[in-house]
Structure formats: C-alpha cells, structure tokens
Image (spheres, rainbow, N blue to C red):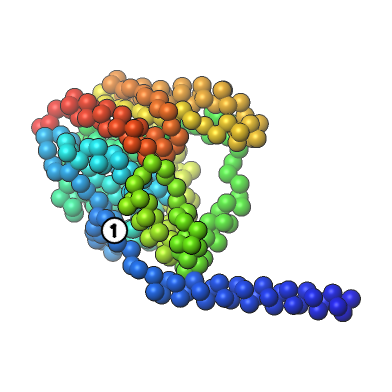
Amino acid sequence: MKVLLKICKGILKSIGLLVAIIIFAGLIFRLFAPKPQPPGELMDIGGFSLHINSIGSKSNKPTLVIESGAGAPTEYYYWLGEGLKDSMQVVRYDRAGIGYSDVSDTPRDPETIARELHNLLEKAGISPPYIMAGHSYGGHYIRVFTELYPDDVVGLVFLDAPHPNESERLNMPPEPKFLNTLYYIGAVSGDLGILGMFDRILGPILWAPGLPEEVTERYHDYTLSGKYLWGYLKEEKWYPGLVEISGTISDFGSVPIRVFAGTNLNEKALLDMGLNPEEIKTERRRMQEEVASLSTNGKAFFLEGGHITIFSQKENADIICNEILKLSGEVKME
C-alpha cells in the first residue's frame, strides 16, 4: 500500500511539474510572440475598436458588407473580396471580440451588434446603399440590421445561413455541454499563451480550405490570447435570442435576396445521431428556398461545397461573386 501511494505521489508531482513547465513556456511565448498585424484597420467606435477591412472603391454599385458566422474571422471571406474588388467596394469586419476586434463590455444582443456595425460604417465613411451578406449566424444578424436600417439595404445575400426553425425541423440534438467547457479551457489557455504556442507548433486551429497561405498564416494571430474565445462565448450566450428575433423578421418586400447553400453534409455524423441524411438534405433545401421566398425577388443556389467551402474554395466564390454582380446591376442607385 505504501509503495502504491508513493507511486501515485510521484505521478502527481510529475504531472504538476509538466503543467508548470507548459504554463511557464506559454507565458514566455506570449511575452515574446509577434504582435498581430491586421490586414485592415482598427477603428474606435466608442470605448473599443472594431477591425474593418475594406477593399475596392466606391462605385456606381452598392457596397457589399459581409457579416461573418459565429467565431468566423474576416479572412474566411477573402475570395469574395478579391472577386468583387474591381467592380465594387467590399467590407469585411470582425464583431467585438472576434478576430482582431477588441472585446466589448456591451451586450451581445443582435440590435446592439447591428448598431455597432452601422456606427463602424459611418465612422469609416462607408455610405449606403449596402448589399448585406451573412454567413451562418450572420444570416440572422443581417435580418436584424435590415429591420433597423431598411433605407440603407438594397439586397441580401445568405451564405449557408440557417433557417430560424432549422434545429426543430431537422430534429437536431442539442450541442454537447462539454463543448462550452472546452471553449472556456481554451480561452484560459489562450490568456496563458499555451493555445498560441501549440497553434504555432501544430498548425492553425482554425480551418477554411482553399485560401492562400498568406491568409491562413494570419490565423495564428487569433490564438495569441484568449480574447477570441472569450468573445465567442459572450456572443454565443445571446444566440437563442438572436434566432428568435430573426424568425420574426420575415417579409422583405421586393428587396432582392440571393441564397447560397452547400450540398455537402457529413453523412456519417448524421447517421451516428440517428438522422436520415437524405431527409436532412431535402428539408434543408426546402428551408433555404423558404428564405429566398421572403422577398418577391428571391433566388436560391445550391453549390457543391460545405458550410465554409462554398466560399473559401475559389471556384464556389466565383459563382457567388458573379451572382452578386448581377444583383448589384438590378439595384437602382439614387
């Protein structure tokens, strides 16, 4: 028995020493790590700064404003900017706490986020009209923005954005609770420099296939502290309210809507959850067509790609860019 206790104490001491070494190494890494270099600029909107990356010049076409998905940085939408910058102005930005933007003490309710974006655009001198593009969660946010600023928006683009009733209609199981715990652990390890250290050693934690190395190399900037994950967790708490509000905004009159959805699903994961992949595909298609029907001028497009690769793969981004250019040609500029 004494021998067993001695062995256990030795193991615990070794584990404790290893943890201490990792923490020390992480803190050293964070102390000497290069400072993030945003590709755009940080703009103070009143107590905190948001990162905005605007390319292309103001023209006789509306400005495309991209609202990202949950935790998705502006870099994910690189090909959309590149494909349109010679024809129109394209604005990518990071919500508070995400990507290069500062964490904010303001609530993360959708109305506040919409007002912060509007304030950012004003501060940056980027005037309407806007075509609002929303990826994933961003599809909910652009509904709210359009509801608050209807005179500013002349078109809506949904990029694999969920239907407000998607979880219920697809009978999707709730997200495992341990994931939130992992995010908290990741945020703390980020503050200690551990996340950034391992991100450098093992490669970027974020993943968006098809983007050039000059873009993916910047992913390392996001793990140099825990800010990114703290921002994501803060925003995630408001998600049920975001979906509820989004579902009440369901009539866009004749404002043009273009919906782009990926057709590639993880069939094995769906089968493991006891779901029928073909039924899920059919119902998802039906819901995306319903989103397009929120306007009398709505169209839905189904691309060979996944939730991110429908725009991170250049060939898909080119299709989306062409349709956005067509849409911009339909809009009457005052």
- Residue at left offset 45%, top offset 51%: 206
Provide residue 90's location: percent of width, then percent of height.
Answer: 22, 42
Position of 44 with respect to 269 (left or right) is left
* Number of numbered discs: 1
* Viewer-proximal residue among 115 and 13: 13
Provide residue 211's location: percent of width, then percent of height.
Answer: 36, 44
Provide residue 234's location: percent of width, then percent of height.
Answer: 45, 55
Work out whether 168 lies above or below 29: above
* Viewer-proximal residue among 252 and 220: 220
Any part of residue 65 in sight: no
- Residue at left offset 58%, top offset 34%: 172
Q: Judging from the image, what secondary structure is the residue with disc 1 in?
A: loop
Work out whether 107 lies above or below 62: below
Work out whether 190 lies above or below 81: below
Q: Which residue is mark 1?
A: 38
- Residue at left offset 41%, top offset 37%: 309
Provide residue 140's location: percent of width, then percent of height.
Answer: 39, 38
- Residue at left offset 46%, top offset 23%: 285
Amino acid carrying mark 1 in the image: Pro
Quarter placement of the C terminus: top left
Any part of residue 289 in sight: yes
* Viewer-proximal residue among 332 and 56: 56
Locate residue 267: give its quadrant: top right
Position of 167 with respect to 145 (left or right) is right
Quarter placement of the N terminus: bottom right
| Label 1 packing within 10 angstroms: few (<14), some (14-19), many (20+) | some
Locate residue 41: give its quadrant: bottom left
* Viewer-proximal residue among 105 and 203: 203
